Image (cartoon, rainbow, N blue to C red):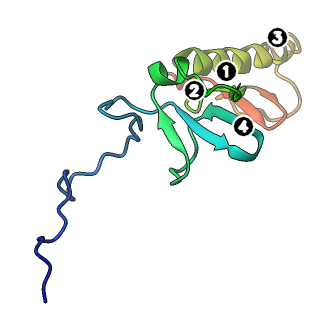
Amino acid sequence: MGSRRGPLKSAVPSNIVSPVRRCSRTACGRPAVATLTYVYADSIAVLGPLATYAEPHCYDLCAEHSERLTAPRGWEVVRLTDGSAPARPSGDDLEALANAVREAARPQERAAGGGGNGARGVDPTEGGRRGHLRVLRSPEP
């Protein structure tokens, strides 16, 4: 005989899937920033950076819940920090990189300017060279 219940229906329509992982805490919809894993054998709760992918035995937490995390009596909380650089470079990082490239090219520009035209054929758009990097001058209008 058939089941008295109808087919299971999801609370969220299946055609709406968020690419952002959400906090695992009940009624919290904030984006997750950390992953909590329990090591039952050692009575340790490990809170680290957001895992690359969601796993069934881990819990994703938002910033607020990860800061307020406490462990049961007798357990230890280990907080791992991610010491790497941000995943996306900021505008300041890109500006600093551009300034470093310009600075690296400056001494060679002065040397080329003081030595006359030089015997070697030099591309007039090339401003300087260091290793595998070159600085190109803007084309004149």
Instruction: Give the residue pinned by disc 2.
Output: 89
Asked if the residue at tag 4 contacts the one at tag 3, i.e. Cβ–Cβ closer than 8 Å, the answer is: no
Q: Secondary structure at mark 3?
A: helix
Q: Nearer the viewer, mark 1 or mark 4?
A: 4
Going by the numbered disc 1, the residue's amino acid type is: Leu
Sequence-wise, which precedes: disc 4 or disc 2? 4
Q: Residue at x 64, y 29 (%)?
A: 125
Instruction: Give the residue pinned by disc 1.
Output: 97
Determine the CA span between mark 1 and mark 3: 21 Å
Sequence-wise, which precedes: disc 3 or disc 4? 4
Task: Quadrant for residue 118, please give it.
Answer: top right
Q: Nearer the viewer, mark 1 or mark 3?
A: 1
In this rendering, would 18 be left or right of 35? left
Instruction: Give the residue pinned by disc 4.
Output: 43
Determine the CA span between mark 2 and mark 1: 10 Å
Q: Residue at x 55, y 51 (%)?
A: 57
Q: Nearer the viewer, mark 2 or mark 3?
A: 2
Instruction: Confirm whether residue 141 shows in the render.
Output: no
Going by the numbered disc 2, the residue's amino acid type is: Pro
In this rendering, would 119 be left or right of 40? right
Sequence-wise, which precedes: disc 1 or disc 3? 1
In this rendering, would 24 be left or right of 85? left
Residue 91: where, in percent of width, then height?
52, 18
Going by the numbered disc 4, the residue's amino acid type is: Ser
Determine the CA span between mark 3 and mark 4: 64 Å
Residue 54: where, in percent of width, then height?
50, 50
Between 29 and 20, the one nearer to me in the picture: 29
Instruction: Give the residue pinned by disc 3.
Output: 110
Asked if the residue at tag 1 contacts the one at tag 2, i.e. Cβ–Cβ closer than 8 Å, the answer is: yes
Q: Nearer the viewer, mark 2 or mark 1?
A: 2
